Amino acid sequence: MPEARGAASLLVLFFHVLAFSGVVDSATFTILNKCTYTVWPGILSGAGTAQLPTTGFGLQPGQSNAISVPASWSGRLWGRTLCAQNATEGRFVCATGDCGSPTVECSGAGAVPPATLAEFTLDGAGGLDFYDVSLVDGYNLPMWVVPRGGKGGNCTATGCAADLNAGCPRELQVDVDGGGGGSVACKSACDAFGDPKYCCSGAYSSPATCKPSGYSEFFKKACPTAYSYAFDDGTSTFTCASADYVITFCPSPSTSVKAAGDQYAEAAPAADSSEAPAALIALQASASDRTRSKPSLSVAPVALAAVWQLLQLLSH
Ligand SMILES: *[C@@H]1O[C@H](CO)[C@@H](O)[C@H](O)[C@H]1NC(C)=O
Ligand SMILES: *[C@@H]1O[C@H](CO)[C@@H](O)[C@H](O)[C@H]1NC(C)=O
């Protein structure tokens, strides 16, 4: 049934045109899984910000999902690993990044540390988006954020491309299967020891008193643009105006950090190694000029043409 298939793809085109036409003022987050294993992203909106229509889903290796995010959204996004529906507990359980909700949707619940976090405040001070990748709550998998089509500020890629699990200091490791499965995540020193010195709390609650530790430096060496402790702002916060974002898990799967003491793999991948597939980029490129702008009349003829062609096809 080639006609039916043609009609269906035209319909898809039509809705893409609508979705990217600037009818809504929004940003697009394209979440891409380049890991060799399934990742279940979780999304949590910040206080006072409505949850997105989706707050959790699964991504097979190679799969991606583009979601529309309101213009002034703030919140965080992370990846859950080693998840399964647990019959005993009657809920969806993940070994890392679990959000404690009964289903795959996190529905307003955040990640249990340790988890690599991508944090966003869109359209904040000066109309800029502020974004970062944070290891302040520990690390569970490599994550890379690339702005697309934005301008101004220091609008560059950031994240943690390295695999830190194997090289994680022993006292910070999170093991499954009684240690036989190896480390699946790496705690922050704050999480592991609860010491105010590591948590930047109590007497250490200012940038002047809370300094990097040997533990935070383990994270910083491997991932120089990611937050390694609470007051790491200068080298870890990025800004961009009117961008869309591609968020990639395992941007370059080969960068495994060797055991502590060995040379750390300097892990920032070449800019193009975090690219989404070509077709996706083409879609992003054509969309990125429009998604953050006000409604544009130029879209109407394209939409009309799509509908007209659809009607032609259906009438045959
Ligand atoms: C389900 O949860 C129970 C209790 O936490 C645990 O002992 C069991 O191993 C889990 N089952 C699976 C299939 O993960
Ligand atoms: C990026 O710009 C912001 C705002 O000016 C600044 O606070 C931050 O330190 C800059 N980030 C980097 C990595 O230079």
Image (spheres, rainbow, N blue to C red):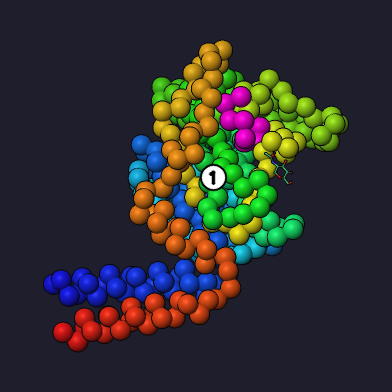
Q: Is residue 17 magenta?
A: no
For the N terminus, the image quarter is: bottom left
Seen in the picture, residue 181 relative to 98 is either above or below; the reply is: above
How many residues crowd around disc 1 within 10 Å: few (fewer than 14), some, or many (20 or more)? Answer: many
Q: Most extreme residue toward the left, as rendered?
A: 1
Q: Which residue position is annotated with label 1?
A: 145
Q: Most extreme residue toward the bottom, as rendered?
A: 315
Q: Main secondary structure of the magenta part?
A: loop
Answer with the quarter of the image where residue 134 lies. top right
Q: Report the residue at 68% width, 43% height from top.
A: 237
Q: Is residue 81 visible?
A: no
Spot occupied by residue 78 in the image (x, y as percentages of width and height): 53, 45
Q: Most extreme residue toward the top, as rendered?
A: 261
Which segment is the magenta one?
221-228
Spot occupied by residue 38 in the image (x, y as percentages of width and height): 38, 42
Spot occupied by residue 198 in the image (x, y as percentages of width and height): 73, 28
Q: Report the residue at 66% width, 52% height from top.
A: 152
Seen in the picture, residue 83 relative to 151 is either above or below; the reply is: above
Seen in the picture, residue 159 relative to 14 is either above or below; the reply is: above
Answer with the quarter of the image where residue 149 lies. bottom right
Q: Report the residue at 37% width, 82% height from top.
A: 304
Instruction: Decide if residue 161 is on the left or right side of residue 302.
Output: right
Secondary structure beneath dot 1 equals strand
Q: Report the residue at 40% width, 69% height from top.
A: 16
In this view of the protein, which residue sits in the foreground, 138 or 207?
A: 207
Three-letter amino acid code of the residue under disc 1: Val
For the C terminus, the image quarter is: bottom left
In this view of the protein, which residue sits in the foreground, 230 or 91?
A: 230
